[in-house]
Image (cartoon, helix red, strand yellow):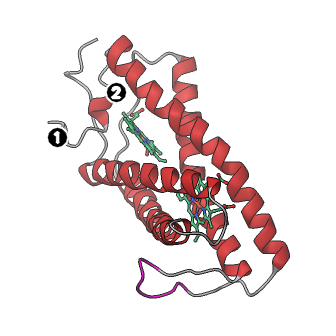
Amino acid sequence: MSSHETTAYAPLLRRIHWATAVLFIIAMLIGFYCGLQPPGTSPRRELLEVHKSLGMTLLFLSVLRLMVRAATKVPPEPSSFGALVRFAARLNHVALYLILFTMPLTGYAFSSAGGYSLKYFWTFSWPRLLTDSPQIAHAGEVAHDTLAYLVYAVVALHIAATFWHVLVMRDGTLARMWPRSGNR
Ligand code: HEM
Ligand code: HEM
């Protein structure tokens, strides 16, 4: 059960993971809060500007992440992982990657087709690739708001699984992703 032999994700991949974790959790909490506020009110309007900007940042960060992941060595799961844990972890990670792309894309589709603001942190505006289409805007909004439930469940499971590995299994799983791990 020693974590001595644990290999880790590439240093850049670990940094991107934690940047993603922080930005994603802030974006998710802002989205949750805004979903409870009536449209057109303050501070929902201003917070949505931050939410959309964080979401677009996460989209590009996730593209970079997959490129770094493809170019580097992914450590094999610890031998202490049984077949079921291995399967559950892979399923959870695939779901997280799908979420990292579908949330920004549905949010973008809904804002672009609906004619809503696409400003990046009060600077430039992202190009509006989808012209006014109430159907696409509605479908994007329904998808974004429905997927939000999956987001809460999958992220909660991911964090709970980390606690389980650290506190119960003590199998060095966190060290695989920890930035200051001595492993390369
Ligand atoms: C990883 C990226 C993203 C995550 C995790 C995320 C998550 C969420 C969540 C959890 C909600 C609350 C849903 C509800 O309670 O109804 C929400 C709402 C919203 N999101 Fe996102 N989002 C992301 C990216 C984006 C992007 C890129 C845009 C637009 C460019 C966007 C636009 C919106 C809007 C306008 C709402 C309010 C929807 C409503 O009130 O019906 N989101 N988002
Ligand atoms: C406090 C929050 C978080 C903790 C403690 C955490 C912890 C971890 C740990 C320990 C791993 C390595 C698992 C392994 O090697 O089997 C991991 C992997 C991963 N995490 Fe997180 N995480 C957090 C938040 C997030 C968030 C918010 C996302 C994205 C929405 C995310 C996405 C991922 C993905 C996609 C992987 C798989 C990495 C790969 O194989 O490329 N994590 N996380």
Dot 1 corresponds to which residue?
180
The amino acid marked with disc number 2 is Thr
Dot 1 beta carbon under 8 Å from ligand 2: no
Highlighted range, magenta: 120-126
Image quadrant assignment for residue 164 = top left
What residue do we see at 57% from left, 27% from top? Answer: 88
Indicate the secondary structure of the residue bearing disc 1: loop
Is 133 placed left or right of 24 in the picture?
right
Q: Which of marks 1 and 2 is nearer the N terminus?
A: 2
Indicate the secondary structure of the residue bearing disc 2: loop
Is most of the magenta stretch helix, strand or loop? Answer: loop
Is 8 placed left or right of 110 in the picture?
left
What residue do we see at 66% from left, 43% from top? Answer: 149
Q: Separation of disc 1 and disc 2 at Cα?
A: 14 Å
Q: Quadrant for the C terminus, please.
A: top left
Residue 35, x across and y down, in percent: 63, 56
- Verify whether residue 123 appears in magenta: yes
Residue 134 vertical position relative to residue 145 in the rendered view, above or below: below
Dot 2 beta carbon under 8 Å from ligand 2: yes
Residue 173, numbered label: 2
What residue do we see at 34% from left, 15% from top? Answer: 167
Residue 184 vertical position relative to residue 120 in the rendered view, above or below: above
- Verify whether residue 38 appears in magenta: no
The amino acid marked with disc number 1 is Arg
Residue 34, x across and y down, in percent: 58, 58
